[in-house]
Image (tube, grey):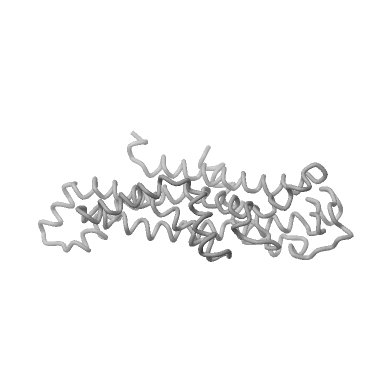
Amino acid sequence: MKKYLGGGVTLAVLLVAVLAPWLAPHDPLRADLVQSLRPPGTPGHWLGTDQLGRDVLARVLHGARLALFIGGCTVLLTAVVGGLLGLVAGFVERWPSAALMRIADVQLSFPFILLAMTINAIVGLGLRNIILSLSAAGWVVYARVVRGEVLSVKQREYVHAAAALGVGRVRLLFRHVLPNVAPSIVVVASLQFSQFVVAEAAISFLGFGVQPPTPAWGSMLSESRDFLYVAWWLAAFPGAALALTALGVNLLGDWLRDRLDPKLRV
């Protein structure tokens, strides 16, 4: 059930994001004050318009493109950086491993969104900086998980046998250890993706992320606060899109965890 529901929702959101320029009925940035605050069902504006007369459907569709782009880039960057650090820390041990874990403990003592928002406020606003701030706050999860997996995998017989045959440490790490750790990285990435999407929306909602008029779900929710009693659709549709995306990716991540973890199939 999780496989089909999560995969179907995730695939649908991905297709909507890719095809947004062709699916959107209007330019998401074009304002028309004459058409402001039109309710859903208005001809030509099926999800209504916002306070500036911009089409809500077009902005939600283009917001999906931005959310998936930020989530994908952040997951890729954190998986590569955190995964490599975890590999090295778990394989070398001694002081590099201890130092990395102490840094991870300090970072984990701060709330994720607060840390990402603080970093973003320091480095500045913008799409690139929000990806970097989320990555700087999220790499630690991969590092801890991968380090723990490496500590277990490197004690297995086939790793000792390869080392006894003279296999170099770098080849041993990437040829024999990494393939057995990769499923854990995939599972963490699938579960982290929705967290990054929601975190980006939260940071944009607070004004530290993607700035208007760029269509982003978080900034759309922020702009709707003054119109909740007269235009409920301004918050309902981007909020529903955000919740549906997070639900689909989480269900897909749960299925991947069940599929890739042999202990859960026993």
Classify residue 81 as left or right of residue 99: right
* Quadrant holding the C terminus: top left
Q: Residue furthest right?
A: 34
Classify residue 145 as left or right of residue 122: left
> Who is closer to the viewer here, 226 or 186?
226
Rendered image quadrant of residue 59: bottom right
Report the label total.
Answer: 0
Q: Position of residue 223 (x, y in %)?
A: 72, 53
Classify residue 115 as left or right of residue 67: left
Rendered image quadrant of residue 55: bottom right
Image point 77% across, 46% down: which residue? 233
Q: Position of residue 264 (x, y in %)?
A: 36, 36
> Who is closer to the viewer here, 256 or 241?
241
> Who is closer to the viewer here, 21 or 36?
36
Q: Position of residue 57 (x, y in %)?
A: 74, 54
Q: Position of residue 160 (x, y in %)?
A: 14, 52
Rendered image quadrant of residue 240: top right
Image point 67% across, 46% down: which residue? 239
Classify residue 61 as left or right of residue 178: right
